[in-house]
Amino acid sequence: MFSGYFEQRKKRAQEQEQERARKRAEEAANPSSRFANTQIRYIDPSFEQPPELNYTLKTRYKWIAFFWSLVLIDIVFLPIALYFGLWYGTSLSHNAVFSISTGALGSVSIVEYFLRFHRLWKRGSTCRVIGARRWYLDWFQWNLSLGWIAVMVELIVGTVPAEPPIRLLAMPVASMCYAFGIELLLVDVLRICGYRAPVRISSLPRGSPLRPGIYSIIEDVIAVDGSGGTEFRQRLNLRYQASHYFRQMLHRITLFWGFGACAIAVATTVIIFTTSRDVAYVIGWTLPFAWAAVWALITTFWVKAELKREKEVWVRERRKASTAV
C-alpha cells in the first residue's frame, strides 16, 4: 500500500518538474510569452505615424510632484535642517551631529529602491527587461545600487573622524552628478565609435550596437517607476529602430544631460571647496537638485516640440516614398 502511495507521489513530482522545464524552455525562447498583456498591438499597421509609445505624463503629474516633494524633503531639507539644528542648537559632538544626519538620510529613496526591486524581481512581473531573467533586474537598478553604495561610503568615511570633514560630507550629490554625466557621455562616445555593448544594458543584449546613454534611463524609469511596463520597453525599442529623428533626439538629449551633469558637478565642487563651511554644505545639497529641476523642465518642453516635429518629418518622408513608388 505504501509503495503505491510513494510511486504516485514520485510520478506527480516528475510531471510537475517536466511542466516547469517546459515553461522554462518556453520563456527562454520567448521571455514575454507568459505576459500576453505586455505584447504590442497596433491599430495602424501601415505606420502612417511613428510607432506609438502609448505613454503620457499628463495623468501622472500629481504623483510625480508628490513623490519628488518627499524626496526633496528627505534628501535636501532634512540633512540641512539636522546640520544647523544639531550643530548650533545642541551640545552634541560634531561627530554625533553627522552620525545622526547620515542615519536619517534617504529613507524615502531607500523605500522606493526596494519597491522597485520587488516590481522587477517578483514572479509575473509586467515591467521586466525584454529577454532577461528576473535576477538581472535592469540597468538603472544596478546603477542605483552602486550609486547608493558610493554615497554611503562617502558619508561613513566622513563621519569617522572626531571632527568630520564637512566639505567631503557636502559632496555626495555632486559625486552622483559626476558619475551620471560621465556614464552618459562615455556610452555615447563608444556608440559613435562603433563599439558594441560589453554587457547587457537593460533590453539591449550584450554584443548589440550601443544606443544613446539616455535610452536605458528612459526605458527603465518609465517601465518600472512610471508603470509603463514591458510594453513600453517594446514600444520604445520599435520607435528607436523605426525613426531616425527619434534617434537623433535621444543623442542630443544625452549630450544635454551629460554635459550639464558634469558642468554642475564641477561648479558645485568649486563652490564647496572655496566658500565657508555652512555655505558649502547648503550648496552641496541644493544646487544639483535645482539644476536637475531646470534641466527637467527644459527637457519636457523640448521633447514635446521634438516629437511634434518628428511626426511632421515622418509624414513628409512617407509621402515622398509613396510618390516615388
Image (spheres, rainbow, N blue to C red):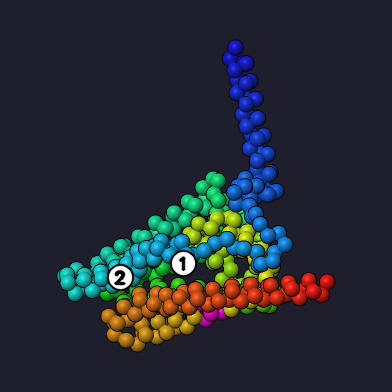
* Position in image of residue 132 (x %, y %): 62, 54
**Image disc number at residue 127:** none
**Residue 88 horizontal side relative to residue 288, left or right:** left
Chief SS of the magenta region: helix
Element carrying mark 1: helix
Element carrying mark 2: helix
- Disc with the residue nearer the chain's start (1 vs 2): 2
Which residue does the numbered mark 1 point to in the structure image?
A: 147
* Position in image of residue 53 (x %, y %): 59, 63
- In the image, the segment drawn in magenta is 255-259
Label 2 crowd (10 A; few <14 / some 14-19 / many >=20): some
Q: In which quadrant of the rendered image does the C terminus lie?
A: bottom right
**In magenta stretch: residue 249:** no
Which is more foreground, mark 1 or mark 2? 2
Q: In which quadrant of the rendered image does the N terminus lie?
A: top right
Measured along the vertical axis of the image, is residue 24 above or below residue 225?
A: above
Q: Type of residue at label 2?
A: Phe
Q: Quadrant of residue 324?
A: bottom right
Q: Type of residue at label 1?
A: Gly
Q: Quadrant of residue 80?
A: bottom left
**Image disc number at residue 77:** 2
